[in-house]
Amino acid sequence: MAEAEMFPLRARGVSVSLGGHRALDDVSLEIGARARTAVLGANGAGKSVLLRVLHGLIAPDAGSVAWGESGRRPAQAMVFQRPVLLRRPALANIEYALAVNGVRGDERRDRALEAIGRVGLSHLAGRQARVLSGGEQQRLALARAWALRPQILFLDEPTASLDPNAAAEIERLIGGIHAAGTAIVFATHHLGLARRLADEVVFLEQGRVAERTETDRFFSSPASAEAQRYLQGELP
Amino acid sequence: MPEFPQDLWRIVALSLEVSLAATLIACALGLPLGALVAVGRFPGRRGVIIVLNALLGLPSVVVGLAVYLLLSRAGPLGELGILFTPAAIVIAQTLLVLPIVAALARQIVEDAWTDYREQLTSLGVSRARAVPTLLRDTRYSLLTVVLAGFGRAASEVGAVMIVGGNIDGVTRVMTTAIALETSKGDLPLALWLGAVLIGTVLAVNTAAYAIREWSLKRHG
């Protein structure tokens, strides 16, 4: 199905309460095909919850999430801050994801090898995934997501707890995934990452969209008082 | 040192044979059952969990009596003619081990599901498909469950005595042999047989633990 029929992703009046806490409050936004959207905000602002709602992991209590005119969900994937890797070799983790999604035989093997090659882990294909370093595990998680050929990729704090070199590598890979035609939506505290990778910023404040604007404008002249305080480091 | 029965090794072998068979059958049924209860969402799930946990304390003599009634000549399965055979012992032991395996597996897999759920759901894995994945990924923890089940089977005496009859050369196992020697007043022999039983169980556990440690180092 054509991208145009499945995009934009529209969230309308989305509200979510978790454990009695209002995590998202009347959030509305649109994500276009091939978008590069950074979701920023202080701790507890609702960034991760928003990604999960858009990805379909959490059903909103109110409001709706809809895909394009067709209503059909595009191929999508999500990379988590702490990816869960199965207790099996690195390549087998990718093959598992492909098998679940109906990719069979030689094609599965070929796509898994291609994906692990793209993240530079071919030499570790047979290594047990759980014994890889944090950076390697995150690259493997990216490869697993990439192998599914998503039209949109959600990333929750993809560079958190990585050293600068590993974070730079992840950033390069995310850029590569977008360049190949995948929309990316990522939550991060890493302002440099948002500045370099995103075309637009969605800034959340206590579960509400306080500001949604182009990245350059957000960093040069944030419109909301909350965003100004956040950029000045006054919010956690 | 007391005089051991001439067929001691046959008794030991039969003990291992029936206990391992019962553990194997109970695991084949109990591990998927526990995982399904852990991952599944269905009406009455809480009730099932409560019953599984309650069955951990299932009195062995009650199980022995139930199996006896089932397999006795007048019972519904009497035609099988397996009362007072090793097969009857395996059935009784399986019924005792099954709740242990299912209840403990349920807890382990449910804990893992908490960690894995978002990732697997994101990948498009259904709950049913998640069951074998979770069982595989928790296999080292589940090994402890298997050992607990084996321990229960190997140490069982009440039900085994009822359905096996402690027939010399046919259904006499370590535990019933110990019970017999104790009733005869040959306490030294009973103690030595007990030591052999404990040693056997210890050897099995040591081997399993070594395999677990080696595998954990290798697979992370």
Image: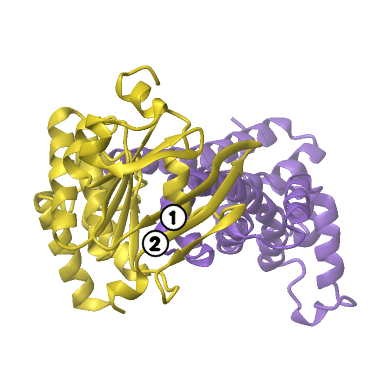
Quarter that holds the N terminus of chain B: top right
Residue nearer the viewer, B160 or A4: A4
Q: Which chain is purple?
A: B
Residues tagged 1 and 2 counted as in contact (Cβ below 8 A): yes
- Mark 1 or 2: the one toward you: 2
Residue B124 visible, this orientation: yes
The residue under label 1 is which amino acid type? Leu
Q: Position of residue A38 (x, y in %)?
A: 30, 43
With A11 as the anchor, is B69 left or right in this view? right
Q: Secondary structure at mark 1?
A: helix
Where does label 2 land, which residue?
A: A9
Looking at this view, name the residue that lies furthest to the right: B74
Residue at image point 36% right, 71% down = A6
Spot occupied by residue B12 in the image (x, y as percentages of width and height): 57, 50
Residue name at image x 66 percent, y 62 percent: B90
Residue B17 vs A6, above or below: the answer is above
| Left or right relative to A13: residue B216 | left
Disc 1 or 2, which lies upstream in sequence?
2
**Is A110 situated left or right of A128 in this image?**
left
- Tag 2: Cα neighbours inside 10 Å, few (<14), some, or many (≥20)? many
Q: Colour of chain A?
A: yellow
Q: Element type at marker 2? A: strand
Q: Which numbered dot is residue B27?
A: none
User: Callout 1: residue from which chain?
Assistant: A
Any part of residue A133 in sight? no
Alpha-carbon distance for marks 1 and 2? 8 Å
Task: Give the residue drawn at x 48%, y 46%.
Answer: B143
Closest to the observer, A156 or A17: A17
The disc placed on residue A54 is: 1
Q: Which quarter of the figure has residue A77?
A: bottom left
Residue B207 in picture, x, y percent from top left: 41, 42
Give, as a three-letter code, the residue at label 2.
Answer: Leu
